[in-house]
Image: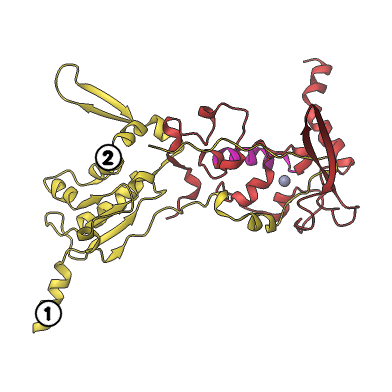
Amino acid sequence: MAHNRVIQWGAMARTWWLYDAKFQCPYRSAEKLCMYLEGRHKPLYHPLSDVGDHVVVINTRYVAMAEDLWRKQQYKHDTRYAGGKSSATAWRLHEADYTKILYKAVYSAAPKNLLRPTIMRRLHLYPEEDVPDDIIGNVSDVIRQIQVVPKPLDSYSAQEIEEFPKLFDWPEDHVIYKRKATTEKKEES
Amino acid sequence: MSAGMRFVNNLHKLSYRLALTQKIGHQNRSAHISPLLKAREVIEKTEGNVTTIEGKIVDSPRKGKILDAPGPDNLCPLCRLDLDVKYTDVKIISQFVQEDGNIVPRQISGLCFPQHRQMIHLIHKAHSAGLMQHLRPHIFPEEYSHMSDHAWKKYNVYYTEIIEE
Ligand SMILES: [Zn+2]
């Protein structure tokens, strides 16, 4: 039947996925991305066969780390020369390259065999939302985010905050303090 | 421990009992019975060499928006509502934050001590995650505050409460 041939094309084709890393934990997203990169979400998966998909990750600059991991997580490197050992905290590595932390997280979550370099080549990381047209043109589906993106208080309008039910009222002798205009946030160069 | 020390250690409990008897901590329940609640606004004017500071009595900004929560009268508003407040619920948390970024005293907010302690943690988490950037404590230098661009503080932070499977 000619129809079976088309079914096989559809089954073996490499699809492209999009993932928004904004406010997502890099280590927990890496486990989810690896499932798509290895092809573990397909029924024809086998650990020795190369059946994985492509994953395009945007907003890697805005990944979120748990509590104080930006300051405490250490990334180590050794050149194997004398005095070649070095280590950097997560925020220093992130400053140098905004895609490095997610790359290292996926690299350590990927299977430790000879398929790992080919799996890593199918991961496309972008620090912001602008992706080249020849990459974003292939994308056909979106991977769901693992964490809820929190809404800051500034994103609500003043009327929305005012009309929200209040749990207690100010006492009679309460003095309304109006803070002076704060210094504007410094813009990054 | 002497009797005097024990009295000093329990002073906060004593003041809370006093607040209960004087109905300071539960004004939210009697808001619709008692006369209109007022607040004061300090206005500072400078004309040449003369500076005038005026304490103007205005209506409370929360007038008419107090939630009449069901439940027994001796419980605090959060216990009566039985809410599972998380640090991302900034509309609730910001009610317990003063204009200078600190927590509202328990005698005013009327929270019980376990809820008050929980609220301290929630405010700290919301501040560190950058969710209430215009309510931060302004007494610290900029590099110690949670809004600054100092080193790791400009990057996003989450706490394990909001992880969803
Ligand atoms: Zn309570």
Instruction: Find numbered disc 2 in the image and state the secondary structure of the residue it sits on.
Output: helix
Discs 1/2, front = 2
**Residue situated furthest front in the rendering:** B48
Residue shown at 76%/49% (left/top)? Answer: A168
Instruction: Find numbered disc 1 in the image and state the secondary structure of the residue it sits on.
Output: helix
- Which residue is nearer to you in this view: A164 or B80? A164
How many marks the image carries: the answer is 2
B64 to B160, vertically: above or below: below
Q: Residue B119 in the image: x percent, y percent?
A: 64, 41
**Residue situated furthest bottom in the rendering:** A1
Chain letter of disc 2 in the image: A
Residue behind mark 1: A4
According to the rendering, which colour does chain A have? Answer: yellow
- Which residue is nearer to you in this view: B94 or A185? A185
Q: Is residue A91 left or right of residue B150?
A: left
- Which residue is nearer to you in this view: B13 or B25? B25
Label 2 packing within 10 angstroms: few (<14), some (14-19), many (20+): some
A17 to A69, vertically: above or below: below
Q: Which chain is red?
A: B
Q: Residue A171 in the image: x percent, y percent?
A: 82, 43
Q: Main secondary structure of the magenta part?
A: helix
Q: Is residue A184 left or right of residue A47?
A: right
Residue behind mark 2: A100
Mark 1 belongs to which amino acid?
A: Asn
Region in magenta: B111-125
User: Which of the two discs, 1 and 2, labels the residue nearer the N terminus?
Assistant: 1
